């Protein structure tokens, strides 16, 4: 089978690519070729005869069509403008996050083969008037342009799937912790920074109170979720083509405590607490507790606890060693 | 103030225009001018110095911008491709029902005056995995392209409102009964036909079982709802910019019974029962019961009963007389 990953230059795309190449198959089918594209040239996940990297501006419908017309059996659609960036550059957010998804769906439709598409949505589709615990049937009331664009894209994925034009599934991703690399423009970026930087011997700023809670999932688990999603037969999905992924709810205090247990008090001391009312307001508007019944029933799994997440980061990103 | 009505050539647009002209004001502000546009030339609601009619292809972003740039304080956005038509012509449905809404919002945004927009959404945003009674916080799981396009447009209206670019409100309309005029391409069109045609001395076909239930609202009440919406201050709406309108739940049998009570057995005999599995399937997928708490609290009102709806139709459309 032929696989396409959009936005594949990001950390999830790179890890997903590496995992697919290592597995050699997905959903029980052998992988012949993986095309990993991003808006800028991506180094991809190393050299492999099956791996082809390239650039794609997903806002360019013709470019999307040109690529997709080569024929793909499975698409992981990760390309997106992140939350804070989509909020400040509204036009860019709509062009990438909504129009980009539509271009992709249209191109896949024109293949006429009902290809599988796994779409990276977000728990940012929730917000505002929410219950204390998000359930599978909680309504979507996004309070960011990013969340609105993801929710609208989910509607497209569902409609194209209902009509048999694609076989789609939208995964609402929790905040991914610990993100490797540098901070990005997502409002949630601090949740990774306060663990990643101290583990690397660097300082980090925590802009929210320690009792603030976040609903999180590790990079390992989110990659597993994408791969699991790709193998789910449409008969098990029915008409509901959106799923909120299982994660764990962790307070900032508990994250810092686990950091201390694993890396010692010096690591904790590298976190400076500088309250930021704007970020606190955004974080307070997120859904901290989610009861992801349907996804669990379909075989998606959360991390065991925050320690497991930190230890996976140390193993995967730091070669098993962290700063003392 | 200056008012724009898109899709104003339809029956709701014509009635709304007539009512606005008669009232002379809306939301406590005097109406200086009403522009009523539709994709084809509309005769509008008669002659009036304040009334200007014209054509607008809402899929043409430049045309929308050209019109809107004249400056409007209030827009009633009714332009749409109806359900069955949007289902068979998917491209047209998306262009009109989603892109059209976006073009309008973009043009209103560029005015920089945060104009009011009242958007005609639909209970077609519900479907599939629904509770027995729709509540204000029921999730949207549309099972038609039309419903998906309306739901996605609601997300746009909410996002543009949240950012202060427009002051928007999406009204989820029940099935409007009794629609005047001819049957259209909506799957629900029979619900008006089985009353309208017998009252006019003509035959009608009922394609669904008499125990099928529908959630309905009269033309009079929907016009009142649009006008009431236009006068609601944004402080009362907060962040939730979608409302399902109060209606009444009536079985087809009860509709026919009321027809008989008002117009006699000969009227009932003009209804031929010809089951249509496709239409039955669509109707069975709709939400027949809705608990529209929030809209009622905000002052929106349903009809008293089906008799009131039929009598209003006779008064408004038939000059007070019906076929015996």
Image (cartoon, coloured by chain):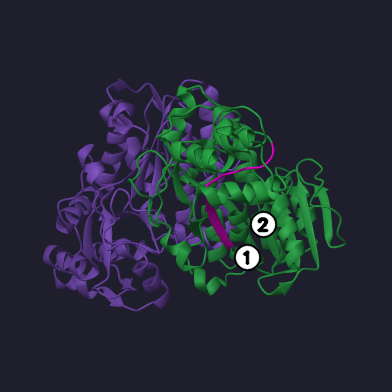
Chain colours: A green, B purple
Q: Position of residue A300 (x, y in %)?
A: 52, 63
Task: Give the quadrant of residue B179.
Answer: bottom left
Q: Give yes or no for contact between labels 2 and 1 (Cβ–Cβ under 8 Å).
A: yes
Q: Position of residue B60 (x, y in %)?
A: 61, 40
Which label's residue is closer to the chain start, 2 or 1?
2
Left or right? Give the position of A68 relative to B306.
right
Q: Is disc 1 placed on a helix, strand or loop?
A: helix
Q: Crowding at label 2, few (<14), some or many (≥20) Cα neighbours within 10 Å?
A: many
Q: Is disc 2 placed on a helix, strand or loop?
A: strand
Left or right? Give the position of A281 relative to A191.
left
Task: Give the quadrant of residue B206.
Answer: bottom left
CA distance for labels 2 and 1 = 8 Å
Residue A172 counted in the magenta span: yes
| Residue underneath mark 2 | A76
Residue B232 counted in the magenta span: no
Of B323 and B1, nearer the camera is: B1
Q: Position of residue B197 (x, y in %)?
A: 29, 64
Task: Give the quadrant of residue B131.
Answer: bottom left
Establish if B194 lies above or below A104: below
For the record, the magenta segment spans: A168-181
Q: Is residue A83 visible?
A: no
């Amino acid at each position: 089978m032929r696989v396409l990953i959009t936005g594949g230059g990001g950390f999830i795309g790179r890890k997903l690519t590496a995992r697919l190449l290592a597995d050699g198959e997905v959903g029980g089918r052998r992988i012949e070729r993986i095309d990993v594209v991003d808006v800028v040239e991506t180094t991809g996940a190393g050299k492999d005869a099956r791996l082809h990297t390239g650039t794609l501006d997903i806002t360019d419908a013709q470019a999307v069509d040109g690529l997709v017309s080569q024929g793909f059996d499975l698409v992981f659609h990760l390309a997106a403008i992140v939350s804070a960036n989509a909020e400040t550059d509204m036009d860019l957010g709509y062009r990438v996050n909504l129009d980009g998804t539509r271009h992709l769906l249209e191109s896949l439709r024109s293949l006429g083969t009902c290809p599988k598409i796994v779409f990276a949505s977000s728990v940012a589709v929730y917000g505002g008037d929410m219950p204390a615990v998000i359930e599978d049937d909680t309504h979507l009331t996004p309070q960011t342009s990013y969340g609105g664009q993801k929710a609208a894209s989910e509607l497209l994925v569902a409609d194209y799937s209902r009509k048999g034009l694609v076989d789609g599934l939208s995964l609402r991703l929790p905040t991914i912790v610990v993100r490797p690399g540098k901070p990005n423009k997502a409002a949630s970026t601090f949740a990774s920074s306060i663990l990643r930087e101290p583990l690397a011997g660097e300082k980090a700023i925590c802009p929210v109170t320690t009792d603030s809670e976040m609903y999180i999932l590790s990079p390992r688990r989110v990659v597993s979720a994408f791969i699991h999603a790709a193998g789910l037969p449409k008969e098990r999905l029915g008409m509901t083509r959106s799923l909120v992924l299982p994660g764990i709810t962790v307070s900032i205090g508990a994250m810092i405590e686990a950091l201390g247990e694993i890396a010692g008090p010096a690591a904790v001391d590298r976190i400076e607490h500088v309250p930021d009312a704007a970020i606190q307001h955004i974080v307070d508007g997120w859904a901290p507790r989610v009861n992801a019944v349907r996804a669990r029933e379909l075989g998606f799994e959360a991390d065991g606890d925050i320690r497991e997440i930190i230890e996976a980061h140390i193993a995967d990103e730091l070669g098993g060693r962290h700063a003392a």
